[in-house]
Amino acid sequence: MLEKLRQIVCDLHAELPKNNLVAWTSGNISARDPETNLVVIKPSGIKFADLTPENMVVVDIDGRIVEASYKASSDTASHCYIYRQMPQVNGIVHTHSRYATAFATHGRAIPCITTAMGDEFGGDIPCGGFALIGGEEIGQIVVDTLRDSRSSACLLQSHGVFAVGPTAEKAVKAAIMTEDNAAIAWASLALGNPLTIASSDIDKLYNRYQNVYGQ
Ligand SMILES: [Zn+2]
């Protein structure tokens, strides 16, 4: 079932260790098939090197197992909550990437202080509140936090990063850019108070990048 999407989600998982976003088995990616509304997600507690298209788990939009030889990721209920609330989202990535999570330990947004951040996120990467893992509470915080923002990623207090996108690949890109910008912001804050970019310029950066940039 969903052979192609299983392959895509499996291949994208390799990007997480490659980009230093995860340690051991932490972190996960899911993708929704817009036609069937089924979700392909990482199995729980399997090392990245051992992931295959076959051991990906397929669940329905309410998180019920449809096809699986392993237990689904412990964040499955939260991924499914996000898909139910955000119909434009077809891919979700969760990591505990270092610099971004350092901001999350202060409950602090990653400030939009570079043109690259204006391009990609159109403002700060906001930080939501604290929730324990297992149920859909984390998903609720992600939806509430992204609702008032253009950002495709948010932080969860004392936890890590959730990135979303119209495809799983775009969500992975957002997760990578979140960490890159968090590292820049960290270094910049270590030097003192960074300069700010006018919100009207952030709007221009975002609109150009989202609508004009690329091929
Ligand atoms: Zn986590």
Image (tube, helix red, strand yellow):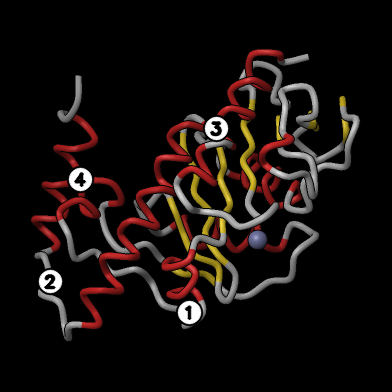
Q: Tag 2 or tag 4, which sits nearer the N-term?
A: 2
Quick check: marks 2 and 1 in contact, CB under 8 Å?
Answer: no
Residue 196: numbered disc: 2
Q: Position of residue 17 (x, y in %)?
A: 54, 46
Disc 3: residue Cβ within 8 A of ligand 1's nearest atom: no
- In terms of secondary structure, where does tag 1 sit? loop
Please name the residue that numbered disc 4 is placed on. Answer: 206
Q: Position of residue 77 (x, y in %)?
A: 76, 49
Taking the image in four quarters, ligand 1 sits in the one at bottom right
Q: Quadrant of residue 200?
A: bottom left
Question: Cα distance, mark 4 to mark 3?
Answer: 25 Å
Q: Position of residue 124 (x, y in %)?
A: 31, 64
Quick check: marks 1 and 4 in contact, CB under 8 Å?
Answer: no
Measured along the vertical axis of the image, is residue 172 above or below residue 115? Answer: above
Task: Inspect the image, locate mark 3, and give the three-letter code of the amino acid beneath it.
Answer: Leu
Q: Position of residue 147 (x, y in %)?
A: 46, 55
Q: Tag 1 or tag 3, which sits nearer the N-term?
A: 3
Question: Cα distance, mark 1 to mark 4?
Answer: 25 Å
Please identify the quadrant where the N terminus is shown: top right
Pick whichever, 137 or 172, lies toward us.
172
Q: Which residue is pictured at 41% across the width and 77% down the height?
A: 108
Residue 107: numbered disc: 1
Q: Which residue is pictured at 21% across the width and 74% down the height?
A: 188
Task: Inspect the image, locate mark 4, and give the three-letter code of the amino acid beneath it.
Answer: Tyr
Which mark is nearer the camera, 4 or 3?
A: 3
Q: Tag 3 or tag 4, which sits nearer the N-term?
A: 3
Q: Which residue is pictured at 75% across the width and 64% down the height?
A: 133
